[in-house]
Image (spheres, grey):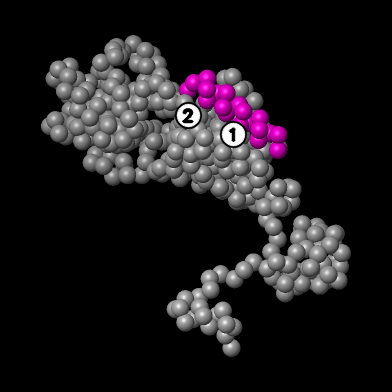
């Protein structure tokens, strides 16, 4: 027979919603099971010192009373599953998904939860998030992705690391170079410079000498190290790389198309372009075709990131494949103390597809 509340809910065509969590506490469970609160606590803490029959009584009493263990309280005292926080500016594209998958594989295997949180570049939001993670005693924080390359960031991240360390939580940079002014903060990254250099090496092997570069300017770590990889490789091959061969382009297809159109409209246009990201490379495809250039006959293109879609372009994009999943794995292992807290620099791989070929004689 329905209770008055249930009957009213039925008349209004709906339910009362989820049932309330029981108000029973640990002492109630202990009293029902006929044991002390300390014994009941040991049962929920996973202690093996409690007799199997006593454990059964406690768990039965908890089920009958609808008692729910306070997981947050257990985690904060180090007795339950902890949180590994994956803090990122924005969760866009397969790059961060692969990093998160690597981190989660380690966190889950070790009985922890992975919490993904975005800051959208808002420093107050970021600061509040770190404070909350500290209050909730997160086991570890992975600070993920490219960041500002200035003294203000260095000071900010050092402060975060100290505040987290005060509650025995570690902070690991994930996909970002080490902070020189804070050498105690561990970094797990991949070699951006070597990746761009591999692209230059392949283009030089094919016979290209006028090689352009499209990417973001100074201010962010990924942009700076990849541009440095281009300049270093061009110097190594004794090739000219004047400023007019390098054009700024934000990390989007539209920005890549606009910058590539300008670069390819020069009288002595480059015969090959290295793009900071695959997004920019896709925009370069569009600009080349709008100008009547064939890929790779008239223009060779090299990208960076190896996002899934670029293999399906016509022709497929030659690009650099960073070990995103492995970065997430190694960073989480270090954060949880499963391997030494030492800086790690992983090597990317070069993926040769159809967007590169010897230059056509002009």
Q: Could you tell me which quadrant the C terminus lies in?
A: top left
Q: Nearer the viewer, residue 297 or 157?
A: 157
**CB atoms at circles 1 and 2 under 8 Å apart?**
no
Q: Nearer the viewer, residue 265 or 162?
A: 162
**Residue 331: x percent and y percent?**
58, 37
How many numbered circles does the render carry?
2
Q: In the drawing, does residue 156 fall left or right of residue 350?
A: right
For residue 327, which numbered disc appears in the image? Answer: none
Residue at horizontal 74 percent and vertical 51 percent from the top: 79
Mark 2, residue position: 147
Outermost bottom residue: 1
Residue at horizontal 66 percent and vertical 33 percent from the top: 163
Residue 273 occupies quadrant: top left
> Neighbour class for label 2 at 10 Å: few (<14), some, many (≥20)?
many
The disc, 1 or 2, on the residue closer to the chain's N-terminal end is: 2
Q: Is residue 21 above or below residue 159?
A: below
Residue at horizontal 62 percent and vertical 28 percent from the top: 159
Any part of residue 339 in sight: no
Q: Secondary structure at mark 1?
A: strand
Any part of residue 61 in sight: yes
Q: Is residue 228 above or below residue 171?
A: above
Q: In the drawing, does residue 149 fall left or right of residue 1?
A: left
- Specify the principal SS of the magenta part: helix
Residue at horizontal 65 percent and vertical 45 percent from the top: 136
> Neighbour class for label 1 at 10 Å: few (<14), some, many (≥20)?
many
Q: Nearer the viewer, residue 182 or 130?
A: 130
Q: Which residues are magenta?
A: 149-167
């Amino acid at each position: 027979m329905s209770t008055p509340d249930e009957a009213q809910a039925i008349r209004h065509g709906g339910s009362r919603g989820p049932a309330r969590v029981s108000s029973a506490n640990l002492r109630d469970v202990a009293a029902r099971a006929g044991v002390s609160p300390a014994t009941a606590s040991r049962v929920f803490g996973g202690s093996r010192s409690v007799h199997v029959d006593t454990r059964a009584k406690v768990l039965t009493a908890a089920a009958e009373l609808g008692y729910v263990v306070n997981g947050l309280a257990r985690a904060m005292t180090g007795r339950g599953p902890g949180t590994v926080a994956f803090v990122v500016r924005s969760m866009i594209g397969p790059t961060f998904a692969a990093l998160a998958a690597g981190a989660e594989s380690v966190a889950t295997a070790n009985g922890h939860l992975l919490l993904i949180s975005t800051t959208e570049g808002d420093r107050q939001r970021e600061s509040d998030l770190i404070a909350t993670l500290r209050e909730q005693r997160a086991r570890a924080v992975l600070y993920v992705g490219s960041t500002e390359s200035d003294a203000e960031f260095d000071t900010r991240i050092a402060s975060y690391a100290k505040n987290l360390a005060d509650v025995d939580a570690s902070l690991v940079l994930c996909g970002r170079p080490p902070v020189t002014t804070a050498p105690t903060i561990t970094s797990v990254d991949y070699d951006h410079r070597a990746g761009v250099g591999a692209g230059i090496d392949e283009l030089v092997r094919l016979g290209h000498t006028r090689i352009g570069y499209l990417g973001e300017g100074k201010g962010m770590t990924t942009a700076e190290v990849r541009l440095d990889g281009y300049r270093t490789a061009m110097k190594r091959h004794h090739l000219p790389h004047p400023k007019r061969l390098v054009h700024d382009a934000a990390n989007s297809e539209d920005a890549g198309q606009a910058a590539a159109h300008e670069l390819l409209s020069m009288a002595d246009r480059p015969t090959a372009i290295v793009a900071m990201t695959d997004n920019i490379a896709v925009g370069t495809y569009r600009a080349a075709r709008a100008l009547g250039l064939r890929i790779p006959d008239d223009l060779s293109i090299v990208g960076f990131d190896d996002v899934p879609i670029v293999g399906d372009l016509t022709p497929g994009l030659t690009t650099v494949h960073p070990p995103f999943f492995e970065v997430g794995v190694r960073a989480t292992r270090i954060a949880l103390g499963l391997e030494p807290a030492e800086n790690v620099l992983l090597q990317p791989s070069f993926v040769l597809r159809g967007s590169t070929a010897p230059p056509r004689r002009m």
